[in-house]
Each structure stands twice: as C-alpha cells, then as structure tokens.
Image: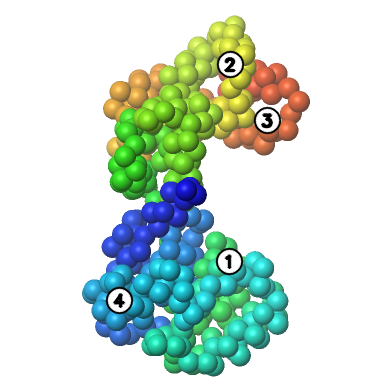
Amino acid sequence: MEHLALYRKYRPTTFEEVVGQEHITKALAHQIASGKLAHAYLFTGSRGIGKTSVARILAKAVNCLDNQNGSPCGKCASCLRLEKEADINVIEIDAASNNRVDDVRELREKVKFLPINAKYKVYIIDEVHMLTDNAFNALLKTLEEPPSHVIFILATTEVHKLPATILSRCIRFDFRLLSIENLTKILSNVLTSEGIKYEKEALKMIAQSGEGSVRDTLSIADCVVAYCDGEITKDDVIKVLGTTDYDLLIEYFDFLKDKNIGGMLSFVQELDQKGKNLAVFVKDLAKHARDLLICQTTKDPNNILNLPSEVYDKYMIQAKSIDENRLLDFMQVFVSAENELRYTLSPRLLLESLSIDAMLGHDSKKN
C-alpha cells in the first residue's frame, strides 16, 4: 500500500481541527454562519502553516448543506465531493505555473458560468505573488466586480510582492508560525493515532526543528519514524536531523568561557571523527548563545525556550557564568559563519578558527 505523508494524512478538514490559527478560523466561521461572506480573501504567511488547508475548509464550508456554526459538516453530498477531489465548483490554481495574462483571461471567462449544484464557485490561487504584472492587471478587473456566485481565495508567502490594488480588494488574514507547544501537541496526536511510541523530549526536538511550520514538522517526523524501530527516542532525532545534543553545546561553551583552546581543539576533533555535520553544529552554537542570552535577560526564559526542566537548569547555570557581552560576541561570530561553513573545503579548520576568534574576540576589542 502506498505510504501517505503524515502532513497529507492528517490535514485538518474543519475549522476546529486547525491549530494555532484561531484568530482566523473563528472569524471565517462567524462570516459563514452569519452569511456575510466577502468576495475575495487573502491568506498570507510562512510555508506549511495552514493557508491552503484553511482555504479548502472555507471552500467546503460555503457550499456545505448543513454547516455547524460555520464549519463544514463533512457528511453532506457537497462536503464529500470536495473530500474526494471531485467537486468541479472548487478550482485550485498554482500561480507559479499559470502566471501569464492569458491564464487569467481564461479564468475571467470561466467565472461567468454558474456553479453546478452549489451556491458558490470557489477559486483558490496559490502562490499568487508569482503572477506577472499583466496577469495582476487582468485579475484586478475580475476582483473589482466579480459575479455574486464567485469567491476568490488568494494565498501567498510573499505578500509584499502583491500590488496595492489587489490588496485593497481582499479581506486579509495573516497566518502565524506555530509555537513549539502547539507543534508538540499536533505531533503527539498524530503519533498516538499511528500507534507510535515516543519520548517527550524527542517530540520537542522535532517541534523545534520544524521552526513553526506544521508541514515541516510532520515531514521531519516522517523521516524519524522511517529511521526508528518502534519508538522515537531523543537519540533517533539527533541522528536523523544532525542536531546537537544539549550536553555537547554546554560542554563546548564551557571551553569558550574558560578560554580552553586545547580542550576545544580536542572536542572539535572528536566531533569531526564522529562524522558530525559541522555546519549544523555552528547553527546550533549560534542558537545556544541566543538561548543563554534569553536566560540572562528575560523574566520567564523557559516560556520562550520550552526546554526540559533538567536541561533548562543547566542552561541557567551556564548563562550566569558568561558575561552578556561575550555571549553577544559568540552569537555574532557563529551567525556570520553559517553560510561560509557550507562551502568551505575544510570545515573543521574553519570551526577551530572561529572558536578561537570567539574566545579571544571580546578581549581584543577591549585592547
């Protein structure tokens, strides 16, 4: 049987199932329940956070024969047609490959036709920022005076590329990146449904790697599930992602703090011999410096970091032992070196040089 990616298998089908975008789903459900629909919506935000999913739910809800407080019932003939991708009244267009003015002119001709056995014909235009200038001008004419039976949903990751004339004719909804807490909750529900056991810390590491994107998080989970044997452990996640164990980051920063060049060189040699991706390691070092700064400067650091309690305690101890200015130096050194490490022929030598620079940098500035 063909494997279905987790992010596709567990795509939300009602507004209630969408996590982390309640400010949008509640507004849309209220509009549908009250019958006060707009003719054009603009969904904007980073990749993989639910724009297309919510667009499909909205398309389903506006034609649902028995919507539940604005959310689609999922049982009527209209909902079932859309779930089977057999609804000719919902048209999804990828603007990346249909971005010419002729494509939009063809769309303008088709919108004139009434929907079949439904109240609305819904056009979902994904990556709408990819349209050409002429295509935008052609689309504008349709958005200005659309037929009453048509609803447009425009989705984009780069809203700044849209003309102001398009923006002014749409109701705009900005999708947010999800918190680690919400991503962990989604992962827990998905893996439990799949019958897969897991360590809580492993789930947090996957959620952190997803960087706010549901799709990226579930794709990472798919990779980890394929690698592990029955249960997802912290070590599985580290091996699959190449991320660095918390204890290694703490140990390395102790070498920096103490200006222990010999210890640091031996540490880097050991990492290199184990096949550690040093470019990923440097990215983790920059994040660790940032995390220690958060420990130093905020009232409730773990509300931001969301670390396991035993790891958080270690971070707080280390944060108190390093001067804030040194942490800023560390972060600047490692952030600026991320791209350089991807292309260097000798990543180990570069990391050693960076480490010594980070150790001595603040003192050299004083002198």
Q: What residue does disc 4 label?
A: 76
Residue at figure coordinates x 27%, y 76% from the top left: 67
**Of callouts 3 and 1, which one flags the residue occurring earlier in the amino acid sequence?**
1
Task: Give the CA distance from mark 3 to mark 4.
Answer: 55 Å
Does residue 81 appear left or right of residue 363 in this picture? left
Q: Disc 3 versus disc 2: distance between alpha carbons?
A: 18 Å
Residue neighbourhood size for the residue with mark 4, other residues' Cα within 10 Å, grouped as few (<14), some (14–19), many (≥20) = some
Residue type at the position of mark 1: Glu
Q: Which residue is mark 1?
A: 127
Q: CA distance from mark 4 to mark 2?
A: 57 Å
The amino acid type, in three-letter code, at marker 2 is Lys
Q: Is residue 77 left or right of residue 152?
A: left
Determine contact: label 3, label 2, CB under 8 Å. no
Amino acid under label 3?
Answer: Leu
Q: CA gap, disc 2 to disc 1?
A: 42 Å
Contact (Cβ within 8 Å) of mark 4 with mark 2:
no
Amino acid carrying mark 4 in the image: Cys
Instruction: Give whichever of discs 3 and 2 has the lower sequence position.
Output: 2
Crowding at dot 3, Cα within 10 Å, few <14 / some 14-19 / many 20+, comes out as: many
Say which residue appears at 31% left-offset and 45% top-offset: 193
Whichever of callouts 2 and 1 sits on the residue coming sooner in the sequence is 1
Mark drawn on residue 341: 3
Q: Nearer the viewer, mark 4 or mark 1?
A: 4
Q: Secondary structure at mark 4?
A: loop
Foreground of the two, 246 or 108? 108
Q: Quadrant of the C terminus?
A: top right
Residue on which disc 2 sits: 274
**Mark 3 residue element:** helix
**Lower position in the chain sequence, tag 3 or tag 4:** 4
From the viewer's perspective, is residue 241 above or below residue 11? above
Does any portion of residue 176 appear in the rendered image?
no
